Image (cartoon, grey):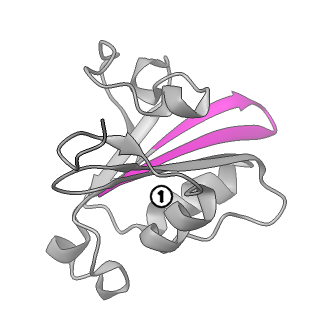
Amino acid sequence: MADGRTARWGKGMGASEASAFMKVKVPEGAEEVKGAVQVNPQEDIYLLSFVTDEKSAVGIAEGLRPEKPLRTRNHDLPPATELFGHLGLPEPQTQKGARWAGVCPPCVGDKRRGGVGWIEIHVLELDADSTRVYMQAF
């Protein structure tokens, strides 16, 4: 029963809603564009993923204005909650070689994203011509 106290996936809410919330433009020609919104009692979680070239992926990460550039993190255990699994994707932090950056837009004075409390990006090179971008925000 959906009583507003449990998480649920927003019906009809996908990549365009996630992109609009994050104020991120999906690159022209991107493939496998997927998105979803997990509606929660406290704050909704917006997911966006697509495949593009490495230069575009890095440009999007830099455009978030993180305090530290994309970097490889220790190979993490699967998260307690699977979010990207809802999109048919493996969780990015479980993928070897994925690079990560995160930012609190209000903390870095990014007025473009005033309604976003946190946004993170994972970038995973699939081959020489394609890179998967995973983005999550609330």
Q: Where's residue 135, x and y in %?
A: 47, 49
Q: Which residue is drawn at the image coordinates 61% and 57% (left, top)? A: 15
Q: Compared with residue 42, is residue 125 higher up or lower down, i.e. above or below?
A: above
Q: Which residue is drawn at the image coordinates 22% and 50% (left, top)? A: 4
Q: Is residue 124 magenta?
A: yes
Among the 4 quarters of the image, the one containing residue 67: bottom left
Q: Is residue 50 rendered to the left or right of residue 114?
A: right
Label count reads: 1
Q: Which residue is drawn at the image coordinates 80% and 66% (left, top)? A: 28
Q: Which residue is mark 1?
A: 61
Q: Which residue is drawn at the image coordinates 29% and 69% (left, top)? A: 116
Q: Compared with residue 4, is residue 91 higher up or lower down, i.e. above or below?
A: above
Among the 4 quarters of the image, the one containing residue 2: top left
Q: Is residue 37 magenta?
A: no
Residues packed near mark 1 inside 10 Å, few (<14), some (14 to 19) or many (20 plus): many
Q: Is residue 129 visible?
A: yes
Q: Where's residue 54, x and y in %?
A: 68, 47
Q: Where's residue 50, x and y in %?
A: 67, 47
Which residues are drawn in magenta? 122-138
Residue type beneath disc 1: Ala
Q: Where's residue 70, x and y in %?
A: 41, 46
Which part of the image, by quadrant, shows the N terminus? Answer: top left
Q: Main secondary structure of the magenta part?
A: strand
Residue furthest to the bottom in view is: 111
